[in-house]
């Protein structure tokens, strides 16, 4: 293993400019750098590990799969989230069951389901074909496209949608109201709903 590659790996934890330059050089080195990054993960802090995940995704070497699976047990929720999403984007074999365990760990920690970690894990499981999002027929039928082709639902149907989702054991985690005017979409402030959900129950 080249000492220069080992040095680059340690620089992933450095100041922003140093870390960025090390990241770029490791990506340039490609698969030759992957073993050193895997070996150096345990000595990196959270910032270095997140940057290493970015390198793994850019290089696309499946040998990083076991290391990403181990990162699902990190003490840092962002590291766990990024590792989960990288496992999906790289289509790592054998990632589904570790991702399911990571999701169960979120449940055990009582992490609210609208936080980015459980959202990222759900996305990863969906991308790997291990989870199917549920959109009840009525909600699907009422769906409309905004001016920028983003999916949305007319607010006049809000009550119907809430009831339809509830009937199918679904819940809205991120309500946001928008105004479509002359071909542009604007967020409307002051429309947050006061949800009182029991995050300790399964979702």
Image: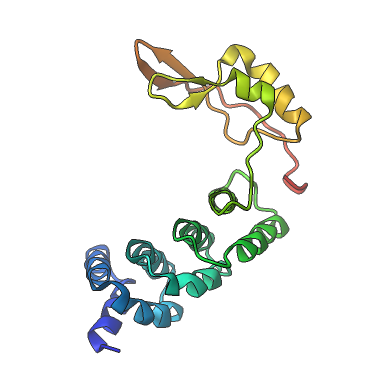
Q: Residue 188 location, x and y as percent? A: 47, 20
Q: Left or right of 150: which side holds 116?
A: right
Residue 154 vs 60, above or below: the answer is above
Q: Position of residue 85 (x, y in %)?
A: 49, 56
Residue drawn where x is 26% and y is 81% of the image:
5
Q: Which quadrant: the N terminus?
A: bottom left
Vertical comparison of 193 with 70: above or below: above
Residue 4 placed where, x, y %? 23, 84
Q: Is 151 placed above or below 56 here?
A: above
Chosen colour scheme? rainbow
The number of numbered badges drawn on the structure is: 0
Residue 109 or residue 80, whichever sits in front: 80
- Residue at 65 percent of width and 29 percent of height: 194
Q: Residue at x 53, y 62 (%)?
A: 80
Quarter the C terminus occupies: top right
Q: Taking 74 as reference, is 42 left or right?
A: left
59 left or right, relative to 114: left
Q: Position of residue 172 (x, y in %)?
A: 64, 33
Lateral position of residue 43 relative to residue 202, left or right: left
Q: Nearer the viewer, residue 6 or 85?
A: 85
Q: Nearer the viewer, residue 117 or 99?
A: 99
Q: Residue at x 49, y 74 (%)?
A: 67
């Amino acid at each position: 293993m080249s000492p220069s590659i080992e040095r680059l790996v340690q620089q992933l934890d450095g100041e922003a400019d140093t870390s960025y330059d090390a990241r770029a050089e490791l990506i340039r080195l490609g698969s030759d750098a992957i073993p050193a990054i895997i070996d150096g993960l345990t000595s990196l802090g959270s910032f270095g590990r997140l940057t290493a995940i970015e390198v793994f995704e850019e290089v696309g070497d499946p040998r990083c799969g076991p290391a990403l699976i181990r990162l699902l047990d990190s003490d840092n929720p962002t590291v766990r989230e990024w590792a989960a999403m990288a496992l999906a984007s790289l289509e790592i074999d054998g990632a589904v069951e570790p991702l399911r365990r990571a999701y169960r760990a979120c449940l055990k920690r009582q992490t609210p389901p609208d936080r980015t970690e459980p959202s990222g894990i759900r996305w990863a499981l969906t991308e790997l074909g291990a989870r199917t999002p549920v959109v009840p027929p009525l909600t699907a039928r009422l769906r409309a496209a905004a001016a920028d082709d983003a999916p949305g639902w007319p607010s006049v149907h809000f009550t119907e949608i809430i009831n339809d989702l509830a009937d199918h054991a679904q819940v809205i985690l991120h309500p946001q109201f928008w105004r479509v005017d002359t071909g542009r979409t604007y967020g409307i402030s002051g429309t947050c709903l006061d949800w009182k959900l029991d995050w300790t129950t399964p979702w």
